[in-house]
Image (cartoon, rainbow, N blue to C red):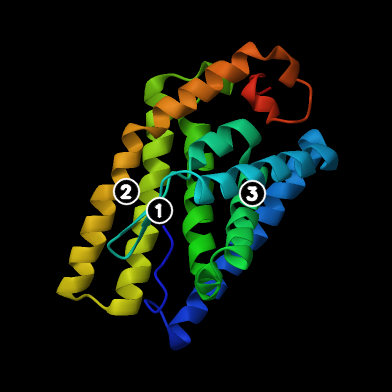
Amino acid sequence: MHIEPGLVTGAKALLGAATATTAGLFTLKLAATAIREQGIASLAVRSVIATAAVFTFFEVLPHHPVGVSEVHFILGSTLYLLFGAAPAAIGLALGLLIQGLFFAPFDLPQYGMNVTTLLVPLFGIAALARKIIAPNTAYVDLSYVQALKLSTAYQAGIVGWVAFWAFWGMGFTSDAFASVTTFGLAYMLVVTIEPLVDLAVLAGAKSLKGLKDSGLVNRRLHVAAA
């Protein structure tokens, strides 16, 4: 999902800064809610764990350049289910920043676009989760279909944003369409894997009852909403 250097340049790149700022402000709103629900210490710890996980996803898991971007196993729905929306958003933003600062400085000019591509789909699946998961269902009890819907929505959101940035930078050319299509087809293959990862992680979390009141995970992971 990294936008290739040089794809969006000049004044057009300012849009990425604007969208990232908006996403950042919404993350602060989510963080305030998370603090009210589980306290600032829990938010901080969950954010640190999520950041470490994101950095690992980017640097350790397989990732390959395809079309206008790269295919990564970001596991956005997994992060959301385990840690909640605010820690997942903070983890995605900080993990991406750490990668750029220390391992891929050529990605820093595209940081605003890349962070927007990661965060807006996360906000989308947070809204989707409220619609497809009953209030009396803890996340550890999700079905495969529910996990698949969340994963598909997140990956589709990433593909949509990458396509937007590609067309914004390149215009609606045949090369742009070909590159976006190639990337989109490759990226949606992640959907065949991520729901299984979600269910495996949730099954492991279900067996670890000690996490329930630890503050290390999202309270909704083990406890149904009130």
- Amino acid under disc 3: Gly
Mark 3 sits on what residue? 91
Mark 2 sits on what residue? 187
Instruction: For marks 2 and 1, give the one nearer the viewer.
Output: 2
Q: Secondary structure at mark 3?
A: helix
Q: Does residue 93 appear in this view?
A: yes
Q: Are marks 3 and 2 in contact (CB under 8 Å)?
A: no
Quadrant (top left/top right/bottom left/bottom right) for the N terminus? bottom left
User: Which quarter of the figure has residue 64?
Assistant: bottom left
- Cα–Cα gap, marks 2 and 1: 9 Å
Instruction: For marks 3 and 1, give the one nearer the viewer.
Output: 3
Q: Residue at x 71, y 44 (%)?
A: 47
Mark 1 sits on what residue? 158
Count of all numbered marks drawn on residues in the image: 3
- Amino acid under disc 1: Ile
- Front-most of residues 26 and 42: 42
- Cα–Cα gap, marks 3 and 2: 21 Å
Counting from the top left corner in percent of width and height, residue 158 is at 40, 53
Sequence-first disc among 3 and 2: 3
Q: Are marks 2 and 1 in contact (CB under 8 Å)?
A: yes
- Amino acid under disc 2: Tyr
